[in-house]
Image: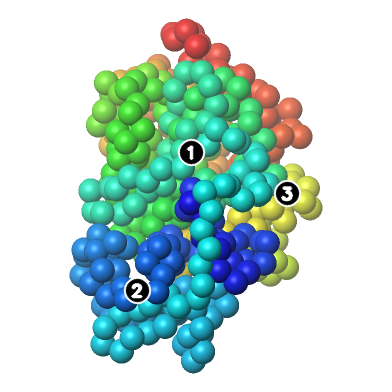
Amino acid sequence: MHYRFGDCELRPDSHELVVGGNTRTVEPQVFDILLHLVRNAGTLVTQDDLINVVWNGRIVSDSAISARISAARAAVGDNGREQSIIKTVPRRGFRFVAPVETTEEPAPHSAASRADENQRIRFCRAPDGTRIAFATTGSGYPLLRAGHWLTHLEHDWNSLVWRPFLDRMGQDFEVTRYDQRGNGLSDWDIDEFSLDRFVDDLEAVADSAGLGRFALYGTSQGAPIAVTYAVRHPERVSHLILHGGYVKGRMLRVSREEREQGEALLTLIRHGWGKPGSPFIQAFSSIYIPAGTREQIASLTELQRLTTSPDNAARIRAAVDEFDVGDLIDRIAVPTLVIHARDDGVQPLDQGRELAAGINNAEFVMLDSPNHTILEQESAFEVLFRSIARFVKEDEAL
């Protein structure tokens, strides 16, 4: 069911808010508040009702609710003075007062939904109650991609960085992927970003998606998460693929230069996240995709704006720079492939070599690339996917 009011439309199936024909990104909790109010248009919705539906009964302050209501109003062109769409009933709750039309026919597909007609986004809950969005696409042997930042399950299909990656990986694998906590369509209002909580998210997705044994792919910050999961659940992981990963986060390494770079990156994130033309964009893109085209860099900028807030981006970056799996890598008991770009500016080649050297019988593939995220125009792009497919096919019939 789609819900239309004024020039707005709520699409629960794709978790989209469309305003004036354009998709508008809102935090998951703000979307859920809008959806609950719209579904109960004309009737009083109490604060207790919102807390039960949106926050799963957790203790929430009045100021937090007010902030989300304000964000919901702003998203649909309303404000606290006019209250022409969402009306506050003092000391009682809220009422959605704008006329609402419903339809069972899907609205014209956005570019994102056209990208993969078979994608179905679902949600599960981590042990601490955080909602994690996940989806499965492609065909072949089951592969789960560990979560990392700069992903959005719906908008990834419009990304010049991620769309080619997903299309190519889906040729060989049935890919389950998810937006990590604080990111994309998963909950943004997060109390804790830590390695254990990120692993909890992966565990929840693997179970909710009904995966038995599967290949586990961890790239960048997803590599330590994948390592930890593989050590805890070796019976579930048939193959472990670690791409552009690391053993110790930047802030734990011996090099003072790397620690200083980490602190500088955090400062740039706080002041320039998602702002086209800001000095941060040039610095960020020169590190992550130095060989990217102007269009790919612009796409990366848009992903920043869509995937998370500047505060969450800084908190996630600070957390992953403290990851340490040095005491786990020699306990990995599953076949492992380590892949690393020769001139990776985010995670130095030495980190990939250290991973491979510390894992018993791990295979190491070095890509001839300066990019942390491998781009489709590079020769390394096909090398990456052929290496992964060959590694899995050696032991499993796809």
Dot 3 corresponds to which residue?
296
Please give the name of the residue rendered at 32% of the width and 22% of the height, measured from the top-left corner.
212
The x and y percentages for residue 312 are 44, 63
The x and y percentages for residue 256 are 48, 57
Looking at marks 1 and 3 on the same chain, the residue that comes earlier in the sequence is marked by 1
Dot 1 corresponds to which residue?
120
- Which residue is most to the bottom? 81
Q: Is residue 132 above or below residue 136?
A: below
From the viewer's side, name the closer residue of 248 and 124: 124
Distance, label 3 to label 2, CA atoms, is 46 Å
Looking at marks 3 and 2 on the same chain, the residue that comes earlier in the sequence is marked by 2
Q: In this view, does 49 lie above or below 168?
A: below
Q: Which of marks 3 and 2 is in front?
A: 2
Q: Is residue 260 visible?
A: no
Task: Count neighbours of disc 3 (C-alpha within 10 A) and say few if under 14, some if 14 to 19, many if 20 or more.
Answer: some
The x and y percentages for residue 122 are 41, 43
Q: What residue type is labelled 2?
A: Thr
Q: In this view, does 164 lie to the left or right of 377?
A: left
Q: What residue type is labelled 3?
A: Gln
Q: Is mark 3 on a helix, strand or loop?
A: helix
Q: What element carries label 2?
A: loop
Q: In this view, does 391 lie above or below 120?
A: above
Looking at marks 1 and 2 on the same chain, the residue that comes earlier in the sequence is marked by 2
